[in-house]
Image: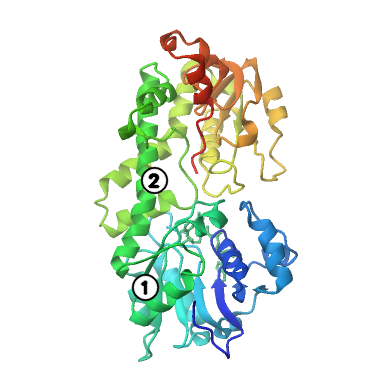
């Protein structure tokens, strides 16, 4: 168990506590009976959370939020002075890269200048945001002043939307710049994590960046395979399915699809910047993943004069079954289509935006539908034959299809080259998850 400080009002305060990482983390600790304060500058979101409303999709969080608010273990604060009232200070603010893909480490460190007067050496400062390597050392140097600071780095490795489940399942990496920092952080996280893995600071920093770069490169590989297959007139999804079937060595090959969002590209670029831009695979992955919208548009241009087309993008969130549209490639796709003269319409299940249209309307008005996000709600959605469908996951049904057809659809059954596949296999193939969490 973590140390309890008699004079502290809170066991822990989470700075950036209303964000996608801070809020579920706070809820998870509060559920275990720790007194948690969520400190944030976003009052609009804070008022929602105080009323027990989750501000974004996080599966399983809503009920626990209501419970911990009622029990009084979770509070929201906009008062920076509250930082001094907690024994653990966990930092989960954003760590973006700038327009040149360079990590904004200075902004992160400058943030500590603002809170410095509310920090004290009895506290353990835990960095949870994903940071550029050596940031914690820089922080220690900056706080300096002859005082003994206890700084730990405990990277977050959950996939957005599933934090409540994964915080209880994933081992927690713990590193620190003092033995006390490591011990105290390990004690704290052992309250929610099933396993603590202690590493050096450098190891922890690389573990986090490597984890996201690995995912990003895996998706890039799938996207490159998809482009090769499509140019060759072959359906990548069928290749993937047949390749994986009974062949463990290919089991991890993902579906093709937009790889975006606030973390994967950003963290791959943090690693590239750290390695003096020698991370060639990372840059190649960026070119492939960011190039997928262009590939789709180029393919469409071969068949259509886009200036005469109404094109609908189904799904604006950066991945399936969440409402987070940050850095979604759906918007980039829309921009490229518009630049080529198309009239573009957006539809999204989980986010309200006055410019979005319903999925039914999208199908009604558009000549072409591009499924950009495979939300479960789109599964089995019927599209009339007159509408051309680009659907990398094969999640919607019907429509006029060029490659890829998508093996999960009913059409799969009639593909002659697969006549040896039994009906049983076809139906079991339908159960395969198409979600790329
Ligand atoms: N989103 C993910 O899936 C994920 C996964 C693992 C790690 N991370 C990392 O976690 C960090 C946070 O990401 P996120 O997605 O939660 O971002 P977010 O934008 O959802 O949350 C950040 C929160 O910090 C608040 N904030 C900003 N400046 C502040 C300040 N000066 N004082 C107090 N609060 C402030 C914002 O209002 C916001 O609520 C990033 O480093 C990210 O790379 C994110």
Dot 2 or dot 1: first in sequence order is: 1
Look at the numbered discs 2 and 1 and tell me whether their residues touch, using CB distance below 8 Å.
Answer: no
For residue 215, the mark is 2
The image quarter containing residue 370 is top right
Would residue 192 appear left or right of 233 to someone viewing this image? right
Image location of residue 109, percent across then percent down: 42, 73
Image location of residue 104, percent across then percent down: 41, 64
Q: Residue at x 70, y 74 (%)?
A: 72
Q: CA distance from mark 2 to mark 1?
A: 25 Å
For residue 145, the mark is none
Scheme by which the image is coloured? rainbow
Give the structural element (helix, strand or loop) at label 2. helix
The answer to whether one can see residue 309 in this image is: no
Image location of residue 332, percent across then percent down: 51, 39
Would residue 180 appear left or right of 406 to someone viewing this image? left
The answer to whether one can see residue 427 in this image is: yes
Q: Residue at x 59, y 75 (%)?
A: 34
Q: Residue at x 74, y 69 (%)?
A: 70
The image quarter containing residue 201 is bottom left
Residue count near mark 1 (Cα–Cα under 10 Å), binned few <14, some 14–19, many ≥20: many
Residue 400, compared with residue 376, is above or below; it is above
Image location of residue 18, percent across then percent down: 61, 65
In the image, 190 versus 11, the foreground residue is 190
The image quarter containing residue 180 is bottom left
Residue count near mark 2 (Cα–Cα under 10 Å), binned few <14, some 14–19, many ≥20: some
Residue 38, compared with residue 352, is above or below; it is below
Foreground: disc 2 or disc 1: 2
Report the residue marked by disc 1: 136
């Amino acid at each position: 168990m973590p140390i309890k400080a008699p004079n502290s009002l809170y066991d822990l305060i989470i700075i950036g506590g209303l964000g996608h990482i801070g809020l579920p983390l706070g809820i998870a600790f509060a559920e275990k009976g720790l007194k948690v304060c969520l400190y944030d500058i976003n009052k609009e979101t804070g008022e929602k959370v105080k009323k027990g409303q989750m501000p974004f999709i996080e599966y399983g969080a809503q009920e626990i939020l209501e419970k911990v608010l009622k029990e009084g273990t979770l509070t929201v604060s906009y008062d920076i002075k509250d930082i001094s009232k907690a024994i653990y200070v966990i930092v989960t603010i954003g760590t973006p890269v700038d327009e040149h893909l360079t990590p904004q480490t200075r902004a992160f460190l400058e943030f500590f200048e603002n809170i410095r007067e509310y920090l004290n050496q009895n506290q353990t400062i835990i960095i949870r945001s994903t940071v550029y390597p050596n940031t914690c050392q820089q922080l220690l140097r900056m706080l300096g002043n002859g005082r003994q600071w206890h700084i730990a780095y405990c990277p977050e490795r959950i996939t957005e939307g599933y934090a409540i489940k994964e915080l209880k399942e994933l081992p927690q990496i713990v590193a620190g710049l003092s033995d006390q920092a490591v011990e105290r952080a390990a004690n704290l996280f052992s309250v929610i994590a099933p396993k603590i893995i202690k590493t050096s600071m450098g190891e922890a920093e690389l573990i986090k960046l490597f984890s996201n770069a690995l995912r990003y490169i895996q998706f890039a590989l799938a996207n490159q395979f998809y482009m090769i297959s499509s140019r060759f007139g072959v359906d990548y999804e069928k290749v993937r399915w047949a390749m994986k079937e009974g062949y463990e060595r290919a089991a991890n090959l993902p579906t093709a699809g937009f790889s975006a969002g606030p973390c994967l590209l950003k963290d791959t670029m943090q690693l590239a910047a750290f390695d003096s831009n020698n991370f060639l695979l990372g840059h190649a992955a960026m070119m492939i993943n960011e190039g997928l919208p262009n590939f789709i548009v180029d393919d469409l241009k071969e068949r259509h004069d886009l200036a005469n087309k109404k094109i609908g993008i189904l799904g604006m969130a950066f991945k399936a079954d969440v409402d987070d549209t940050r850095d979604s490639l759906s918007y980039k796709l829309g921009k490229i289509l518009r630049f080529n003269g198309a009239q573009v319409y957006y539809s999204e299940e989980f986010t309200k935006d006055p410019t979005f249209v319903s999925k039914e309307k999208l199908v009604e008005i558009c000549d072409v539908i591009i499924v950009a996000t495979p939300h479960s709600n789109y599964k089995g959605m019927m599209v009339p034959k007159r509408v051309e469908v680009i659907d990398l996951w094969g999640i919607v049904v019907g429509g006029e299809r060029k490659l890829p057809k998508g093996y999960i659809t009913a059409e799969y059954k009639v593909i002659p080259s697969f006549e040896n596949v039994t009906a049983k296999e076809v139906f079991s193939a339908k159960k395969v998850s198409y979600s790329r969490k």
